[in-house]
Image (cartoon, rainbow, N blue to C red):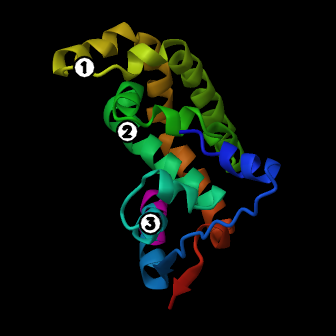
Amino acid sequence: MEWGFLPSILKYLSLPVTIEYFMVSVSDAELCKAAASGADKFLEVIVDGIRRAAGDCLNAEAIMRLNGYQNALMAYSVFRDEVMEGGFIQLIQNGYGPYIFYNPFAKSMRLFGVARLAVLVNKANEIYRANRDDLERERDDDEFMAMYEQYEQFDPLQDEFIELEPDFTNTIAAYVDDNINQFVDEIVR
């Protein structure tokens, strides 16, 4: 699911590229209430607005209609939820490996101010790419659980992410707040 190639191929073919991006709107009251509750709640309001604009369907077509900032924030949301719940194994087994590791997610995280997260993602990417076929293979529940022992090299990365997640989320929320117009088209009063 490498999406970056499409505009460059069309440009090479001298075809006009027109992508109609989603119009993302959020409520000012919701945003203020969420911000008072914490960085994670603030980001959740933005992510929910993006999801609503995409028709609650994060598929290839929807991803193409998100701008780069929105896409990076959605990727962080998916990454955070999956790794916090079940680690890199769950992230990959749920089909998000290509979305995270074959897109400029790590580079985006560096841009958002969380360089340590970018390093962590790049280390996980090395493990993922070296073992991709096996990591993405369909498995029953017992085989899935055995993967946690088989791929213990993810453990220190998961542990580091879980330990630093509040800092990562706070930094990303501050970046989003400072650049809100890149993520939201309309704040409804």
Is disc 3 placed on a helix, strand or loop?
A: loop
Q: Distance of mark 2 from mark 3, alpha carbons?
A: 20 Å
Q: Who comes first in sequence, dot 1 or dot 2? A: 2
CB atoms at circles 2 and 3 under 8 Å apart?
no
Q: Distance of mark 1 from mark 3, alpha carbons?
A: 30 Å
| Residue on which disc 3 sits | 54
Task: Count every numbered label the image shows and give the total.
Answer: 3
Question: Looking at numbered disc 2 in the image, what kind of residue is underneath it?
Answer: Glu
Question: Looking at numbered disc 3 in the image, what kind of residue is underneath it?
Answer: Ala
**Residue 94 colored magenta?**
no
Q: Judge from the rendering whether residue 138 lies leftward or rightward of residue 19; answer left or right.
A: left
- Report x, y in % for residue 181: 66, 73
Give the quadrant of residue 87.
top left
For residue 174, say whether it is visible: no
44 or 103, which is in the foreground?
A: 103
**Residue 37 colored magenta?**
yes
Say which of marks 2 and 3 sits in front.
Answer: 3
Q: Who comes first in sequence, dot 1 or dot 3? A: 3
Q: Which residue is located at x 61 percent, y 52 percent?
A: 171
Q: Which residue is located at x 82 percent, y 55 percent?
A: 14
| Residue on which disc 1 sits | 139
Q: Which residues are magenta?
A: 35-43
| Residue on which disc 2 sits | 82
Q: Who comes first in sequence, dot 2 or dot 3? A: 3
137 or 184, which is in the foreground?
A: 137
Q: Which mark is residue 104?
A: none
